[in-house]
């Protein structure tokens, strides 16, 4: 067997084994913990193309479970760099906030060549990000668009407080519709982080709506079942990436 075939077979076996172990871990079986595992190869085109959007979501959930358990894969980033230098086959494109505490690749335990990543304060979309998502899915073959907000988001807090500062003012204005759309019976202020988190959740959901409305390319791919467009909220306390219904 050629070296590349051995590498692909090894990675497929590892992915299946890790997925099974992660599923057991999430059932809460007493005394169960994920073992330390490692791999070198980046995703191949065949592996990525054989995944369904739901399987991509499951793999990201399993990665977050490993992150939360402190049992992350022992990534050989140099080997992944070498394996992906002639081609990349990411399974997902992620739009997340620039917050230094919320790096999507780490929170989801993804390696080099596994995800496309866009980061902007408040995880809002614009024409350039939509174009990047269209490239990722329609041309490069990604199966998932994930918009990930997070708790205690400074951009959301700034939008609620009507903060103004140069170009930031225009960015925060894109978040403000989520403030009005958020149903919340308590104190609706920037100092109330429960409200901030509620708006962050609404902001993710409205961004998903905007992506579908503003990108006929992505909307069509989703309607055809080739991709899924989903949202998530990362909890700074506890580390869970909560996938939204």
Image: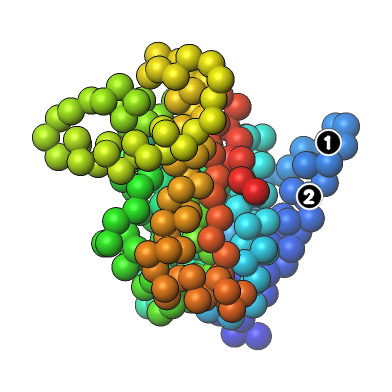
Location of residue 188 (image quadrant): top left
Between 200 and 60, which is closer to the camera in this rendering? 200
Q: Which residue is found at the position 77% from the left and 38% from the top?
A: 33
Q: Is residue 242 above or below residue 59?
A: above
Q: Which residue is found at the position 73% from the left and 56% from the top?
A: 19
Mark 2 to mark 1 CA distance (whole Å): 9 Å
Label 2: which residue? 23
Taking the view exactly as shown, the residue that stands out farthest to the left is: 166
Q: Can residue 106 be seen?
A: no
Residue 61 percent coordinates (x, y): 64, 49
Label 1: which residue? 28
Location of residue 11 (image quadrant): bottom right
Helix, strand or loop for disc 2: helix
Taking the view exactly as shown, the residue that stands out farthest to the bottom is: 1
Q: Residues within 10 Å of mark 1 (few under 14, many from 20)?
A: few
Q: Quadrant of the N terminus?
A: bottom right
């Amino acid at each position: 067997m050629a070296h590349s075939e051995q590498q692909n077979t090894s990675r497929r076996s590892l992915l299946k084994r890790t997925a099974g172990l992660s599923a057991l871990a999430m059932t809460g079986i007493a005394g169960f913990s994920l073992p330390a595992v490692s791999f070198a190869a980046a995703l191949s085109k065949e592996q990525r193309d054989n995944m369904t959007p739901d399987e991509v979501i499951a793999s990201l959930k399993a990665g977050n479970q490993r992150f939360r358990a402190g049992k992350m894969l022992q990534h050989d980033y140099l080997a992944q760099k070498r394996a992906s230098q002639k081609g990349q086959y990411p399974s997902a494109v992620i739009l997340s906030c620039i917050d230094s505490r919320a790096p999507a690749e780490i929170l989801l335990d993804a390696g080099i060549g596994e995800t496309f990543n866009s980061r902007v304060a408040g995880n809002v979309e614009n024409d350039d990000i939509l174009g990047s998502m269209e490239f990722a899915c329609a041309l490069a073959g990604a199966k998932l668009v994930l918009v990930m907000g997070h708790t205690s988001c400074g951009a959301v807090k700034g939008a609620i407080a009507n903060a103004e500062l140069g170009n930031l003012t225009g960015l925060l204005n894109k978040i403000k519709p989520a403030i009005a759309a958020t149903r919340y019976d308590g104190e609706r202020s920037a100092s109330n982080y429960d409200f901030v988190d509620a708006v962050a959740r609404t902001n993710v959901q409205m961004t998903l709506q905007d992506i579908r409305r503003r990108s006929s390319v992505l909307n069509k791919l989703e309607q055809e079942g080739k991709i899924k467009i989903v949202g998530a909220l990362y909890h700074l306390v506890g580390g869970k990436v909560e996938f939204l219904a």
